[in-house]
Amino acid sequence: MDQLPFLLLMVVVFVFFIILPQQRRQKKEKKFINSLKRGDKVVTKSGIHGKVMELNDKDDSCVIETLAGKIKMEKSSLSLELSSKFLKK
């Protein structure tokens, strides 16, 4: 019975430091993806820099123009974190 308060404390810490921040990050990422428009500069999760040329809501994809040409990819492969660092420079 002495371990019950300790286990409850561990669950509370787990929820506040792991689950809630992850949910906030997912909400920000979804908001970022839904607010994309033509001409936005983005960086993919794999590090490819480019500009949004087309958005396709039917299959959740977009066309990114890079120095090497145009690439069609999933919207979910765009990174909010990397894109925001790229835009600050």
Image (cartoon, helix red, strand yellow):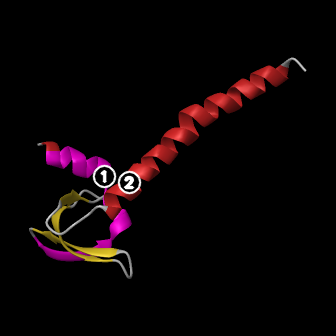
Judge whether residue 82 is colored magenta: yes
Relative placement, left or right, of 1 versus 85 is right
Which residue is pictured at 69% across the width and 28% down the height? 10
Tag 1's secondary structure? helix
Sequence order check: which comes first, mark 2 or mark 1? 2
Relative placement, left or right, of 18 versus 28 is right
Question: In this picture, is 77 found above or below 55?
Answer: above
Judge whether residue 81 is colored magenta: yes
Tag 2's secondary structure? helix
Instruction: Report the front residue among 38 and 46.
Output: 38
Identity, as a three-letter code, of the amino acid under mark 1: Leu
Q: Which residue is mark 1?
A: 80
Which residue is pictured at 31% across the width and 52% down the height? 80
Q: Which mark is residue 29?
A: 2
| Residue 79: quadrant of the picture | bottom left
Distance from label 2 to label 1 (Cα)?
A: 6 Å
Image coordinates for residue 77, horizontal then vertical, percent: 35, 64
Instruction: Report the front residue among 54 and 73.
Output: 54
| Residue 82 visible at all | yes
- Image quadrant in which the C terminus is located: top left
Image coordinates for residue 50, horizontal then vertical, percent: 16, 63
Image coordinates for residue 57, horizontal then vertical, percent: 35, 77
Image coordinates for residue 3, horizontal then vertical, percent: 83, 21
- Please provide the residue range marked out in magenta: 68-87
Identity, as a three-letter code, of the amino acid under mark 2: Glu
